[in-house]
Amino acid sequence: MDKTINYMALGDRIRIARKSKRLSQEKLGEICQISTAHVGHIERGTRIPSLETLYRISKELNVSMDYLFFDTQNDMNTVFKGISAQLAGKDGEKVKIFLSTVKALADKIDDL
């Protein structure tokens, strides 16, 4: 088993999560108390972030540290947090329709 951290893959996962929350590198850096340039380096895998920085990023992006390091997005809690983040600020009536559609699909999941 390879015990090295793939910082380029970690950076890619941060970039994907940041973009899904519609945050700029500048805004993420501001929230996490790091420079925009440092966010860019982390996302490209050219700088190694501190554990503190990774923790702040994971909290702000609503992803687990496991996801950042190992791409374990199968964790249902992480999936639900991601869906919740996507629905935040959307039209309430449209969200209700979406959720009722998901519920209807879930009720029929064994028939799929």
Image: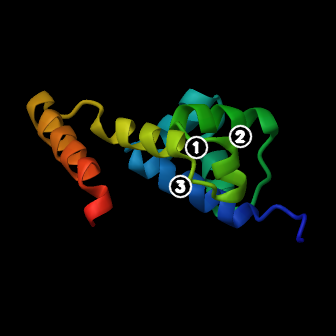
Q: Is residue 54 left or right of residue 28?
A: right
In the depicted structure, whether residue 22 falls above or below residue 1: above
Q: Quadrant of the C terminus?
A: bottom left
Residue that badge 1 annotates? 36
Question: Looking at the rendering, which quadrant does residue 111 occupy?
Answer: bottom left
Q: Nearer the viewer, residue 26 or 102?
A: 102
Task: Determine whether the residue tagged by mark 1 lies in a helix, strand or loop.
Answer: helix
Give the mark toward the camera: 3 or 1: 3
User: Which mark is first along the chain, 1 or 3?
Assistant: 3
Asked if 85 appears above or below 3 in the picture, the reply is above
Tell me the residue that label 2 is attached to: 54
**What whole-number distance in Å separates the C-alpha atoms at marks 3 and 2?**
13 Å
Residue beneath label 3, please?
15
Q: CA distance from mark 2 to mark 1?
A: 15 Å
Instruction: Identify residue type, mark 3.
Output: Arg
Per the image, label 3 sits on a secondary structure element best described as: helix
Marks 3 and 1, how far apart at CA: 13 Å
Q: Position of residue 93 (x, y in %)?
A: 9, 31
Locate residue 22, reporting x and y percent: 37, 44
What amino acid type is highlighted by mark number 2? Leu
Answer few, some or many: residues within 10 Å of disc 3's Cα (few below 14, many 20 plus, some between 14 and 19). many
Discs 2/1, front: 2
Eyeballing the image, is 88 above or below 65? above
Residue 20 vs residue 96, the one in the foreground = 96
Q: Return the x and y of residue 51 as percentages of the image width and height.
A: 80, 38
The first of marks 3 and 2 along the sequence is 3
- Crowd around label 1: few <14 · some 14–19 · many ≥20 (10 Å): some
Q: Please, what secondary structure does the residue beneath circle 2 have?
A: helix
